[in-house]
Every structure is written in C-alpha cells, then in structure tokens.
Amino acid sequence: MTAAVVLLALSALVVFQEQKATTVWNGVYTAEQAKRGAALYANSCGSCHGLELNGGESAPPLTGGDFMSNWSGLTVGDLFERIRTTMPADRPGTLTREQTANVVAHILNVGQFPAGTTELSTRTETLKQISIVAIKPEH
Amino acid sequence: MLFRKISPMLGLLCVTLPLSAQSGGQPSTKNGDWPYYTADLKGTKYSPLDQINADNFNKLEVAWRFKTDNLGPRPEYKLEGTPLVVKGVLYTTGGTRRSVVALDAKTGEQLWVYQFREGKRAAIAPRQLSGRGVSYWTDGKGDDRIVFVTTGYRLVELNAHTGAVIPGFGKDGMVDLKVGMTTGTGKQIDLENGEAGLHSTPLVVKDVVIVGSSFKEGMTVVTHDNTKGLVRAYDAHNGKLLWTFNTIPRPGEFGNETWENGSWATNGNTGVWTQMTVDEELGLVFLPVESPTSDYYGGERPGDNLYGESLVCVDLKTGKRKWHFQIVHHPIWDYDLSSAPILADITVDGKAIKAVALPSKEAFLYVFDRVTGKPVWPIEERPVPQSDVPLEKTSPTQPFPTKPPRYARNYINVPDDLIDFTPEMRAQAKDNIARYKTGPMFLPPVVGDPKGFLGAMQLGNASGGTNWPGAGYDPETHIVYAQANQSAVSPISLRKPPEGFSDIHYVLGRNDTEFRVSEGPGFGSAADAPQPVRTRPGRGGAAAAGAAPAAPAAAPAGGLTVQGLSLVKPPYAVISAINLDRGDIQWQVPYGETPDAVRNNPALKGMNIGNTGQGGSVGLVVTKTLVVLGDSQMTSVTHPRAAMLRAYDKANGKEVGSVPMPAPQSGSPMTYSVDGKQYIVVAVSGGAYSGEYIAYKLPEQE
C-alpha cells in the first residue's frame, strides 16, 4: 500500500518533471497556427504593440530582449492568461481561446521559437506546463 | 448617490491615527514628509533623508505591500502612482476605478478608501487606470484635504482624515472639469461623451489648485477639431474658477497668428497632461504643453502652432502669459513636453540664475532663466529635414540646445548606432532598417509604402528620452539626475484614414495593412468599460480567422530586432547626472543590468559585452546621497528572477546596492520617514503581475 502510494507519487513526479521540461523551444505551435495568429495580431494587437511587435507609446514590445526579460521564467499559460483576461485593452475578452492561442503562436513565431507539428492548446493548465525560456536549453 | 463610503468605521479609525500629526503647519520633505508628487513644488523629487544609504541599501526588506487589484472590478497592470506621505499617512490612487486610499505609512494598513462610480463617463475617458496619485492641501490649522482628478475628469476634494468629500468644494465636493472645455470656436463639449481627462496630479500651491487637461492618444484621430486644451486654476477652499489659460490662443491673444488660415479654430489638444511646477516666491507657474492634433500629422494646422510643445510661464495670480519657449515648431513627432519642469537656483560663470530645467523625450535638458525665459546657454535654430507628406508644412528649423549636450541618443545614426556585437549582426541590422527612411532628428513621418519606405525611423519621440516620470534634482549640488531610454525604435508611417473615419487627411498606419484605431495605455480598462459579448466563430481557429485580413507581408520574422536583440547598440537606456552650473554631463551610466535575453543570447556566447543596461522609461528619487530607481525588466542571471530596485551613488553613478521587486517599476519611487524610520515606496506592475505598492525599510534588528 505504502509502496504503491510512493510509486504513484514518483510516477506523478516523473510526469510532472517531463512536462516541466517542455519549453517554447520544443516546437509547441504550428506554422499554420502562427499564420492565423499573424492575421489576428494585425487586426487586434498591432495598432498598440506595433505591426513588427516592437511596441509603441501605449504598449510594450512583444518580441526581443525587453519582452523576453519580462516573460522568460514564466509559462506560455501565464502569457495566454494575461492576453485572455486583459487584451485587447480596449475590448478584453473579445478573442476566443483559440484566437488567443493563435496570437500566442504568432508571438512565438516572431520570437523565432521553432514551430512543430502540434498546435498550442487552448487549455491554460496545459499551457502552464510550457516554460518560456529565452535561451535554448542545451541537451 | 454615486459616492460610496467603504468603511463605516473610518471616522473612528482616523481620529486615533494621526495623533502624532497634530503639529500643524505646512508639510515638507524636511520633516520626512513627501507632500507633492515631485516631493516639492519645484519638481525636484529630492528628500534629504539619509538613513537608507550606500552602506545598508542591500539590507532593505519589505515593510508592507498594498495590492490594488480590488480597487476596481478587475486588476490593473500599469500602476503609475507615486504616493504622498504627510504626517504618517500615505495617500495615493489605485485600481481600475482610480480609487483614493489612505494607508498607515508604517504598516500599509488601509485607513479609508474613496471611490466614485462614474459609469460611461469613465469608461470612455481618454486617460484611464489609476493615474499618478493625489495632491494635498492644508490650511495649516487642521483642515487637511486630498485633491485629485477622477477618471471622468472631475476635481474632487476629500477630508484627509476621513476620506469624506468636502461638501463646500464645488458642488457636493467636486468640480466638473468638462465644463468650459470646448471644440471649434467655443462649443462646449458633451459632459458625458466629450473628450477630456487627466491622470497627472493637480498642482496645489497656497490656496490655488491648478489642473491641466489631456485627451486620447493622437495617432488615429477622428477629427482634427478635437477638444482644446486648457490650464485652469481653482480656489482650494470652494472650487471657484480663478483663471483659465488657453493653450491654444484665441483671436487677440498672443500667438494666435501661429495658427495660419485661422486653424486655431479647427484644431484641438495642446493640453498639459504631465506635472506642472511653480515658483511660489516669484508667483510663476510653468506649464509643459503637449502636441496639437494630431501627433504625427499637422496638415490641417499650418504654422508653428503655439503653445504646442512649448514651455509656458504664467502668473500664479492671474494665469497671464509671462514668457514661453517653443521646443518644437509645428509639432508632428509626438515629442510633447513630458516631464515636470525643474526649478533650479544655479550659478553659471559666477552669476546666480534662477533657472528652470526641462527634461524631454528629445533627451535634451532645456535650461532657461525662469524669470525672463531666456535660455541659459544658447539654443540654436538649425535647418531640419522637410516633409513630403501632402499638405504638411514642416518648420524649416528647430531649436537645438548647445548646452548641456544631449543625455541620450535621440535619433538613429546609420550605421554607427546599429547593433555591432558582430559584423553579421550589423549587416542584418542594416538590412532590417533599409526598408525605412532614416535621418537626423526631426525626420518627418512618411506615407508608408510597401514598394518604398515602410516608415520614417524614429528614436526618442514616442517613448524615448525622459518621459512622464520626469527627472530629479539635488538643490545643494545643482545636479539633475535623469533616466533616459535610447532604444525605443519606432518607425512612423502615415496613411489616409478609411472613408468616413476622420476629417483629417492622414493618420498613423500603413495603406497595405488593415486600419486600426490606436488607443492609449489602458484604454477600455477603466471600471465600467463595457466588456463586449464575445462573437462566437465556428470551431477551429482557421474559420475564426477567416474574416481577418492577411498579415502584412512586410513584417520580417523577428521584427526589427536582430537575433532577438535591439536594432540599436547598447546601452539601451542611461542614467545621467547633469551639472547645471556647468551645463555638462558629470557622469552617465547604463540603466539597470543586462537583460537575460542579451546576456544569454547564444550569438553572444563567449563575448564580453559589458553592462548593456535595459530599455525602459522610469522615474527616480534623489536622497542625500543616492539616486534610487527600479528596473523596467525582470532578470534572473545574477539573482533570483526579479526586477531590482537599485541605488546609485550620486557622486559617480556607481551602483551601491539593490533589492528585488516582484515586477518592474511602473511608478516613480518616493521616500519618507515616520517615527525615525525611513521608507521607500514604489509602484510595481507589468507582464503577468498586477499593480502593487511596495514599501521598503531597514530591518528593526541587525
């Protein structure tokens, strides 16, 4: 009984660690998703954050060192939630979860994180397992 | 009744609290107070406190925290207030409803909160979120009041001890500041829907309350005939209007002819949205005036457009113009005048001068004799590039100070200013920027063309140099301390507005991209802003995106950045000490520490890049020995993930200590002392972290 619990806990830990090991460098979105996100971005985000994601007077950049410094160490889920609950600033809540995920994919794509074969999830708890890491981890 | 008292016990609470505060008289930094947004009326941000110093700064610990999430229906992520402290009580604004709170300055315990539910008027306000804080008025005999401007542009006075409105002030404790705001030749704006607001703190001097005005961001205006800016003074006792200064002069007033073809009548803005300062002894008020409509296009307003982007000195008693200096003629770069002017009594070549020094987005410190308006060092009119945008008539010359030198980069000098860690990076930067028009300062915006230039490359207008947090000044050493951003790369492109959108010929944007209205920071985030019903597209992101326009073909992967690094070379921002007796820069150091993404960038592996500093625009506090300001960015290489609040030695700019903050500094820090203990309070927010005031002090026990 005790052993089983320990085993269960251990396996959960292993799974947890494996999930934690996922970073934005693991191809966590698809190119197609980023493309859809780019269109949404131009329409919903670009006027404040800049069409090149370079920011402006009214909003911070969403790419480059300034952006990564504020998000590296957090998760894609944190970024997703920030957008979902507060963006676009003039009409928060108007993007669906899918649209929000697509915009996040676009941001990752512009940030030159590699695309993969699986789309970004729309579930916050799943996205919280993907770490935003500025520098590609060495394996 | 819209006003709500939150705490029914507040009367009781506040009778007991400020017992130590019954001494009366005017509060002052000399007594450990911080009674004005900028510490004093002179805009110095200076406090003589020195308990916290180079030897112990690293030992600072959190004394208390105050989260502003629940001061409105949703959290805010851009908390910009700088609190006041008078006699042991801290006053500030916070939250998406811009509530006013009074806290025990020793513990952070809430004493009272005031909120005013303005509904739609706040929801559509041009300046939303909690603003920069409050002001304090006292008769010196126990009638102590908090003065602030609501999101919906009402001037309110509260009893500093209870938070109750002052019934005898205006109507039921408030003055409707929209009354008297006009468009055109004098049409009163609608009190509910009319565009006017303010998020700076009122200027309270003697028995006068002076308030400016601000409007929506001027990038994509719906009309050039926007609300006209005003500066007004009210009687602190009763809210009676004392005088009005027209920042767009009317016919017969000085400067009206600088609006050619009678264009004063059909243009607006030109308000004062940042902090003003005053010389109490000389009775002079200094107004830093913003841009006219619109920020980047002035084809509808030929002429120099006084007092657009001018420093104006008016009489405290009458509001009459004493002198002015226009920093930018016919403004079309959104330079505004962003910072509180600093009053400085200096000695130049043996001669005592009562000066006023103006920090700027241009990263020039403009210094004038504040009595005469004459520049302390020559400011030269020099030829500048001219616009080729239809109907735009740029000024042939612009003013350039000869001293002090610019204290940050204020245009991109290609290729010298481009990133140069490696030749490959320099080459890519040149490639990236080749699609944009580049040139010296005052390079006019262009009509963006995918076959030509995508925009005119700017640095230091919209968010460069010293912005609204302003600078600080040590009145003993005559040195200005200024943080300045020098990596805010922003290409400016104009386009024709879509049919029926605006009566102005050009707005910000590009013809090859979908037109979008540019809103200001936090727009739509105020309490009571509508949360629209979400339209439900079909399942599947592709279907959802079906109606959206194609992404702009011109956006290269990585944007303007070079391998994730800024297009321009470091330092990305700087802190400068500018000696006002000599008109030179005494020292200059990078601001903050190298961002992780730079430090760890694989392309820079093995290279010694030094401290690059970090981009951002923040305010600071000057103490007896230190300049204290926090990072704009989170870092985690040399310490656990944090933005650091740092102390710099005033004498040489050397960093002498730092303590972690959980989020970037978003409001200017301040300092005060209660019962012999010095505190530093700073507003933090941003990224995933919602607004919070944090107080630091030294440990009770070593």
Image: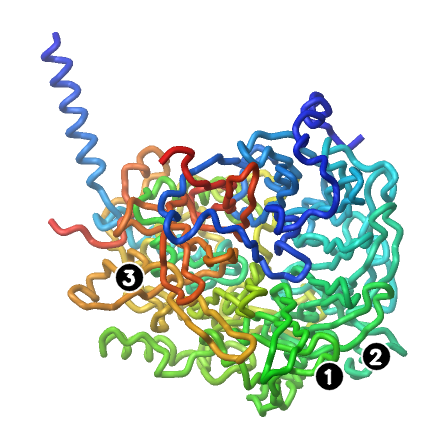
Res B599 quadrant in image: bottom left
- Which is nearer the N-term, disc 3 or disc 2? 2
Q: Secondary structure at mark 1?
A: loop
Q: Tell me if I can see residue B527 in this picture.
A: no
- Which is nearer the N-term, disc 2 or disc 1? 2
Taking the spot 38% from the left edge, 41% from the top edge, the residue there is A78
Taking the spot 86% from the left edge, 44% from the top edge, the residue there is B170
Q: Position of residue B519 (x, y in %)?
A: 59, 57
Taking the spot 24% from the left edge, 45% from the top edge, the residue there is A23
Of residue B45 and residue B683, the one placed in the foreground of this image is B45
Q: Which residue is mark 2?
A: B254
- Which is nearer the N-term, disc 1 or disc 3? 1
Numbered tag placed on residue B598 in the rendering: 3
Q: Amino acid at mark 2?
A: Phe
Q: Position of residue B584 (x, y in %)?
A: 49, 79
Disc 3 and disc 2: Cα gap in Å?
Answer: 52 Å
Q: Which residue is mark 1?
A: B303
> Which class describes the residues within 10 Å of circle 1: few (<14), some (14-19), or many (20+)?
many
Of residue B520 and residue A70, the one placed in the foreground of this image is A70
